[in-house]
Structures are given as C-alpha cells and as structure tokens.
Amino acid sequence: MKSALVTGANKGIGFEVAKILAQKGFFVYLGCRNLELGVAAVEKLKAQGLQNIAAVQLDVSSQDSVDAARKSIQALDILVNNAGIAGGFEQSAISSGAAEYLSVYETNVFGVVRVTQAFIDLLKQSSAPRIVNVSTAMASISLAADLENSNYPKRYVIYQSSKAALNMYTVQLAYELRGTAFKVNAVCPGYTRTDFTGHQGTSTAEEAGQRIAKYALIGEDGPTGKYFSEEYYPAPATCPW
C-alpha cells in the first residue's frame, strides 16, 4: 500500500485531503501538532469506514518533533505540506516586528523545509513521489504590485511574504529534483470556509481538499515546479486570510 503524509491534518483542508487520499487507497498519516486532536480526527475517519489512517504527532516548527515523526514512518509516496498559520491581522510592512515575521515563517517556510528534508530520503524510494505545498494567490507579487487595485488584499505582509517564499522554495526544489520521478507543485486551495478564515470564503473544505489532492495524485506526465489556483482571484478586499 502506498502512503501519504499530510501536515496540519486534524481539521479543515488538511483533514479533507487526508480523507480523499485514504479513499484512494493510500495509508495516510495525519500529522498533527496536538496528538489528541489527531487521534480524534482518525476516529472520525474510521467511523466513516476508513481504516488505513494513523495520527502522528508533528509540530512543523520543532525539529525534534519532525525528527520523531520521521522515525515513526518507514515509507512515503506523497507529502502534502499543509500546516500553516496566518499570524494575526492586520500586518504592516512598517510596524510589524521581525519577531512577528519569524513566528509565521517558522511554520509556513521553515516548517516546510524541515519536513521536506526529513522525508526526502523516503520519497526518493517511491516510484512516483509527489510533494504538494499549500500556498495562496495572496502571495502573488504581480497582483500585489498593482497598488491601485482595491480588490486585492493588502496589509497581510507577513503571511503573504511567507507564502511567496514558499512558492520560491517549491520551484527551487522542483529544479533540484528535475529529471527524476518527483512532481513538486504549489497549490492554492481557494478562499475556504474553515477556522483559518473565520469560516468565511467561497469554497468548502471538501472542495479545497479536492484541489490539493488532484496534484498529489498526478501521473508521470503531470507538471512540476508550478503554481496552481483554480478559483477566481483576487479575493474580496475584506478577505481575512
């Protein structure tokens, strides 16, 4: 049985991605910062008839936690770097301090680096390794650079810049893995109604999960080193994410 690891998977979009992959026949590890919440999520999925799942304590901001999770997993075909934080709003390029940036980057950027590097050796053993990094259209520098565009969210500089850095990491990772079976892509799940957005948005968690799972399941002729967003953007100016 092929296997997958989804970080931040005890609820919301990550939970839905894990559910979809389990339904597709993968053994899915739900990476969760709080193991009790992860176990509860597993029980919820098992109640729906899915048995090929397990919770793994995984705080992507902690190297010790990542290393411990790595020791508990012996094979891996798909890695979905879903865990992320917003860092509170509003955020200012002038007044937000470096410590605020560091807090968000620890999860959204450094966390992805930690997890990817910890599991890359297992992924290299797979015949069809896939890495999906969950990003956002709000990371678009081109859209943000239109200073007169009132529809494009502003003053979320910490979150936006962290995801822009994630996009660059995705491209560089794909470049280093070119010529191999790896497919590495960044995917925006859309403006999704979850705890992360205060349950505002234009998509359900199920719809967002399908968008991410699609690129975790692409074939050998699929793209790599790309960014995908299947929902219309820019989002409304009131978007709180």
Image (spheres, helix red, strand yellow):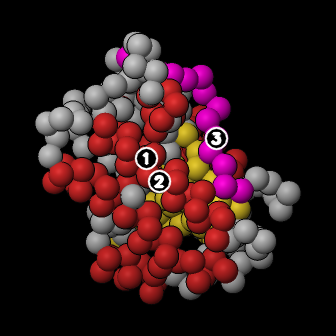
Residue at 38%, 76% in the rendered image: 66
- Residue pointed to by mark 3: 228
Residue 174 position in % (x across, y down): 65, 63
Q: Which residue is mark 2?
A: 166
Mark 2, other Cα within 10 Å: few <14 / some 14–19 / many ≥20: many
Say whether disc 1 or disc 3 marks the residue closer to the N-terminus: 1
Q: Quadrant of residue 130?
A: bottom right
Q: Quadrant of residue 78?
A: bottom right
Residue 8: horizontal and vertical position, in percent? 41, 56
SS at mark 2 in the image: helix
Residue indicated by mark 1: 163
In what quadrant of the picture does the C terminus appear? top left
Q: Nearer the viewer, mark 2 or mark 3?
A: 2
| Residue at (64, 71) in percent of width and height | 176
The reply to whether callout 1 and callout 3 are in contact (CB within 8 Å) is: no
234 shown above or below 70 = above
Magenta span contains residue 148? no
Q: Which of 36/4 is in front?
A: 4
Confirm whether residue 63 shows in the render.
yes
Chain part drawn in magenta: 224-237
Query: On the rendered image, what quadrant is the N terminus found in?
Result: bottom right
C-alpha distance separating marks 1 and 3 = 13 Å
In this image, 69 relative to 219: left or right?
left
